[in-house]
Amino acid sequence: MRRRPPHAAARATASAQPQRSAVAANVRRLDDGSLALVVTDTDAHLLDEAARSGGPLLVRVAPPDAIRAQVELARGLKALGDGPADDACGSLLLAASLSARSPGADPRLALTAILGAADAAWAAGDRPTCLTALAAARLALAGRPADCEQLRDHLLGLRALIEQRPAAAAEALRRVLAHGQSDDAPDALHRASVAALLLGDVEAACRTGARALAASRSQGRDDLAAQTLEYLAYAEMRAGRHGRARTHAREGLRTALRSGRANTAAHHRAVLALTASVEGDTEEVTAQAALALSTARRHGLEQTRTLAEWALARADLGRGRPEAAASRLGGLVRPGGGHFAVRPLIVPCFIEAAVLAGRPDVARPALDALRLWAGFGIDRAASARLARCRALLASDDSEADALYRHALELHEADLGDYERARTRLLYGNWLRRHRRPRDARLVLREALHGFERCGASAWADQARSALRATGEPSPAPDEAIALGVLSSLTPHQLRIARHVATGATNREVAQALSVSVRTVDHHLRNIFTSLGVRSRVELARLVAGTPER
């Protein structure tokens, strides 16, 4: 539609025959609610052309719905990064609707809005709206070029997974992964890494996620890099490499904060709390979970809230407080509680906590949900955890023994040590209670070594206590002395001490741990006081006498 601007058309008096020039002006809403025409620098030369030509200046104004669609898209994307998830979803769905009914509107705007709405609904744990948005996105892709095929399969796989149609989900997600393995585009690689993680192919998820991160960095895509780092941290955690997961989460946190994406930053804080819960760093768990929960509650981020609560509960379980862990997890595993995609991963932890707290009756109903999830075949580790939970709840001793052994056989396919060591710790304690100390010692030693390899300090302490209860000899004198002295340090102080012992400066330690130099200075003074050492050389000598924990 063409019309003369309200302030009158610009005319020139020239002898040449008049010509008509059109300027594509942007329309923006001002603070008072009125609309204003804004001619960009790119279009400024058209004004000069119109003036020279002597013809009328006609400004092409977008239809009202198209203008509103752009406004709502901008508002929704801003809220998606730093705002309530429900608000973001509402604005983005409105933008898609307005764009769809605006003649000649760019179809990419509607697709961007719908995909953003699906992300917002996922973050909020709004399963019905997420399904609706995924279906709408596939419709928006109808008739699009073949280069959208991977995105179509990605949406199809996610929808089938949410609807609990595992065969259809796996088929679509495998196509997504195959496509990403021959593509260098950051978005395609990111979708492939997500697909690999959902398929349980953890190594492929780590490998493809690393490529996606490199591609995002090379294009200056901080928004995608922060999101890629989320899933890369997940994949490393699933692989049992919690140190790497922590490194990725810290980088993701810095990237999110730098780009003003508070919601993504909160999600990375929840991941940091989860990695700290494995290491037994209670201070770090509490601090990061509190910050994550503050944003999650304010912006309705159910996935972030669920992960942070899980981290707090797992820290309680690692410290030998199953009652507190079961109480916190109970609200997350019940139908309608917690995030729908995270809930199946939490169930094994809840069952373990409830049984150890002497409440097996509360845990039994959750076993059915875990059995259903393991039956899908998507999560490769689920079968081992199911066998472990069945052993915990078994009333017959021979059945429990067989189930623990079966769980350990299934764990052989796991990449990491953490879950396998947890099963061995539970089995070793079961053997000890059933007066089989020799068998218990063999299992508990393997559990201890597994926890030490993955840095699960609090869990390693549990394994040591169980070993002492079986009559296991104490460590060698020098090592025992060093371990006893270092036990006075917090996990965070111990990490600083180990970094300093390598010869790193305080600034290098601060960069490695993503803290300030002042924080390192403060902790190092306390470390020297606690250990009774007077130099970095003495500290290095003391730390060198202990195994990495």
Image (cartoon, helix red, strand yellow):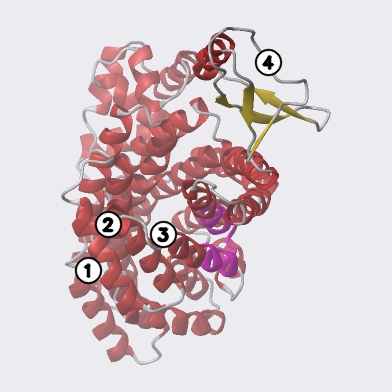
Q: Earlier in the sequence, mark 4 or mark 2?
A: 4
Q: As drawn, is 95 to the left or to the right of 372?
A: right
The answer to whether residue 23 is above or below residue 319 is above
Mark pair 3, 1: CA separation: 41 Å
Q: As drawn, is 278 to the left or to the right of 442?
A: right
Q: Which residues are magenta?
A: 117-133
| Secondary-structure class at tag 2 | helix
What predominant SS class does the magenta segment belong to?
A: helix
The answer to whether residue 3 is above or below residue 282 is above
Report which residue position mark 4 lands on: 10
Q: What is the x, y in percent for residue 480? A: 27, 39
Q: Earlier in the sequence, mark 4 or mark 1?
A: 4
Between tags 1 and 2, which lies in front? Answer: 2
Query: Is 122 colored magenta in this rendering?
Result: yes
Report which residue position mark 3 lands on: 141
Q: Amino acid at mark 4?
A: Ala
| Residue 142 appears in the picture as rendered | yes
Label 3 CA crowd tier, 10 Å (few <14, some 14–19, many 20+):
some
**Image quarter of the N terminus:** top right
Report which residue position mark 1 lands on: 411
Could you tell me if the residues under marks 1 and 2 are in contact, i.e. CB atoms within 8 Å?
Answer: no
Which mark identifies residue 534? none
Q: What is the x, y in percent for residue 463? A: 32, 57
Report which residue position mark 2 lands on: 146
